[in-house]
Amino acid sequence: MVPTVSSLVDPLKPEDDALASLRRRLFLVTIDDTPDALMRVLGVASVQQARLRALSAAPEGQHMAIRLEIDDQGDARAEVLASRLAACPSVRGVGFGWRA
């Protein structure tokens, strides 16, 4: 079983309108290492109209670890994106929080 990635990101912080345009959310996704793994995750982010600011992906054994930084669009949007990513085929874990 793949360990949860939720413990690797900072917990949600309260909204502050003055800094909202500068904040970014960090999503960590563990997915089976298949040829289309990255495209599956990016497809979900695209459909949810997430503005991608940074991306990294690296194999970890039989899995791939994908790190997405996106512009903050609020807690509700982050939760929707996380649930959609978790429902994606081959995804083994999703965690999200603030970029440190």
Image: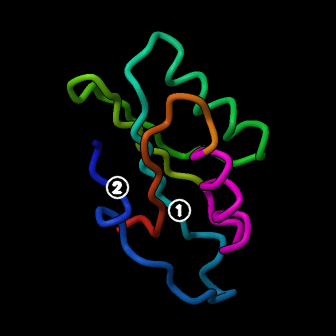
Residue at 60% of width from left, 26% of height from top?
Answer: 40
> Within the image, what quadrant is residue 7 found in?
bottom left
Q: Amino acid at mark 2?
A: Val
Does 54 appear above or below 4? above
Write down the residue under mark 2: 5
In three-dimensional space, the C-alpha distance between marks 2 and 1, rounded to whole angstroms, equals: 14 Å
Residue 4 in magenta stretch: no
* Residue 91 percent across, percent down from the top left: 49, 36
Residue at 58% of width from left, 33% of height from top?
Answer: 41
Mark 1: few, some, or many residues within 10 Å (few <14, many ≥20)? many
In the rendered image, the quadrant that contains the N terminus is top left
Q: In this orientation, which residue lies closer to the viewer: 95 or 67? A: 95
Image check: 35 left or right of 50? left
Does 14 appear above or below 20? below
* Residue 89 percent across, percent down from the top left: 59, 29
- Residue extent of the magenta highlight: 71-86
N-terminal-most mark, 2 or 1: 2
Write down the residue under mark 1: 25
Mark 2: few, some, or many residues within 10 Å (few <14, many ≥20)? some
Dot 2 falls on a residue whose secondary structure is loop
Q: Amino acid at mark 1?
A: Arg
> Within the image, what quadrant is residue 74 found in?
bottom right
Q: What type of secondary structure mainly makes up the magenta span? A: helix
Dot 1 falls on a residue whose secondary structure is strand
